[in-house]
Amino acid sequence: FVLNTLFWSVPIILLSLLKRLVLVKPLVRWLSRCNDACAQSWVGCNKLLAQTLLPTRYDIRGVEALDKRAQYFICSNHQTWNDIHVLQQTFYGKAPFFKFFLKQQLIWVPVLGLCWWGLDFPFMRRYTPAEIAKNPALRGKDIETTRKTCEKYQGLPVAIFNFLEGTRFTKAKQAQQSSPYKHLLKPKAGGFAFTLSAMGAGLGALLDVTIVYPEGAKTFGQFLTGQVKNVIVDVRQLQIPADFFTGDYEADAAYRKRVQDYVANLWAEKDARIERLLSEARSAS
């Protein structure tokens, strides 16, 4: 997996540098497509390696009607680092290469930071309330900066991804939060609204992903040593309410309440779905 990553990082970084030197917009867009094709090839090789070397079986549902030329917002529950590989397995060849909102500091991660930069992953810096109070000009600057990055996606196939829980699920975190869900942490509705505001109404649909490990979530090391036997992935394609793209989450209390209610309902349905899928898996075994 490391060698595969290093191999594909070379053309991705070279194409990225070339893209910064070119001033002709159609050529820049073509180079972006070439870069995304390299990234998809990296994912494809990862998938082939996993299928060849590891015993994991995937039960993937709901991806038949997806369009590789569309724009999607993808959200998922989060339990382990393995989730990233599972998502790659799920959407490879079915949807555009998906991209994350990343913290600004992650651009310094060796090799991968340059690849994320070259693939136009949106790097963001969230300002704290204290920073905004000290300098009111910073209010909304994070969204505006990210929106400018997302303008590069106009007319291009793309899938923007967000773990709405913000961190991996553990029983300790669940108890600390007093989470109302059996299998989930509380989702961050602000992150949901931030993504929609940055991307705009060009997003075709929301892909609500539920990942279930019937034998329990494992570490990445356990995954690489073949200890993850079965994974269930359920994908729902949902229409995003039109008014969600234009509201102000921080300033408009009514809009904020609508988004929070929508996300809470989404998570309640996901919690019930996880329970049902686990019950089905136990019955089948």
Image (spheres, rainbow, N blue to C red):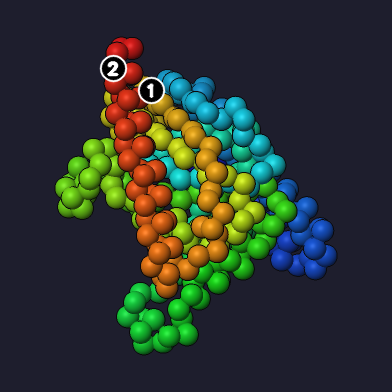
Q: Classify mark 1: helix, strand or loop.
A: strand
In front of the other: 194 or 93: 194
Question: For the point 25% across and 42% down, which residue is it?
Answer: 181
Q: Classify mark 2: helix, strand or loop.
A: helix
- Residue lying furthest front: 254
Residue 58, how many percent across, how many down?
A: 46, 23
The amino acid type, in three-letter code, at marker 1 is Asn
Q: Distance from label 1 to label 2 (Cα)?
A: 12 Å
Q: Is residue 265 left or right of residue 118?
A: left
The amino acid type, in three-letter code, at marker 2 is Arg
Residue 111 seen: no
In front of the other: 63 or 285: 63
In front of the other: 24 or 182: 182
Dot 2, crowdedness within 10 Å: few (<14), some or many (≥20)? few
In front of the other: 64 or 215: 64
Q: Earlier in the sequence, mark 1 or mark 2?
A: 1
Q: Which residue is mark 2?
A: 282
- Where is residue 136, by image quadrant? bottom left
Q: Which residue is mark 1?
A: 230
Question: For the point 41% across and 35% down, which residue is it?
Answer: 210
Residue 57, how many percent across, how many down?
A: 44, 21
> Disc count in the image?
2
- Give the foreground label among 1 and 2: 2
Residue 165, how many percent across, how many down?
A: 35, 50
